[in-house]
Amino acid sequence: MIELMATNNIVTISYVESLLKDAEIDFLVLDQNMSILEGSLGIIPKRIMVTEASLLSAKQLMQDAGLEKEITSR
C-alpha cells in the first residue's frame, strides 16, 4: 500500500473514502484511532493508502475532485 494523502480534516477523509468506494478503488485509512493516544488534539494526520496498481487512478480521481493539493507527493 502507498500513501495517497494524509490529513486531519475528517470531512476530506469522508469525501475521499466515498470517491474511492464509488470508483471501486481498494484503500485503507490508517491512524484513525491515534486520537486516543494523542488526546484528541488532531496532531497525527490520518493516512489514506491505496494499492500501487491503483495509485495513478486514485491520484487522477483526487485531481478531478479538486483535491490535488491533498495528494502526498511521490
Image: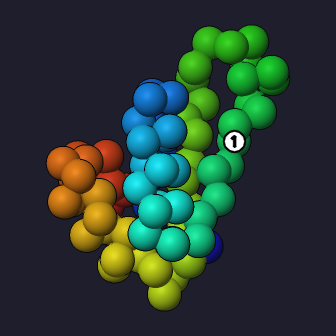
Does 59 sit above or below residue 13? below
Q: Residue at x 18, y 48 (%)?
A: 66
Q: Is residue 63 above or below residue 70?
A: below
- Please give the name of the residue rendered at 80% of the width and 21% of the height, measured from the top-left corner: 36
Q: Secondary structure at mark 1?
A: loop
Q: Would residue 35 be found to the left or right of residue 47 on screen?
A: right
Residue 47 in percent (x, y) is at 56, 48
For the view shown, which residue lies furthest in the right direction? 37
Q: Is residue 57 visible to us here?
A: yes
- Residue 10 falls left or right of residue 32: left
Residue 26: percent from the left, percent from the top? 59, 71
In this rendering, position of residue 46 left or right of residue 59: right
Q: Residue at x 63, y 51 (%)?
A: 29
Q: Number of numbered discs present?
A: 1
Q: Position of residue 34 (x, y in %)?
A: 74, 31
Q: Identity of the amino acid at label 1? A: Asp
Q: Quadrant of the N terminus?
A: bottom right
Image coordinates of residue 56 in percent, x first then y, are 34, 79
Q: Nearer the viewer, residue 18 or 41?
A: 18
Q: Which residue is mark 1?
A: 31
| Rendered residue at 46%/62% (across/down) | 22
Q: Is residue 2 visible?
A: no
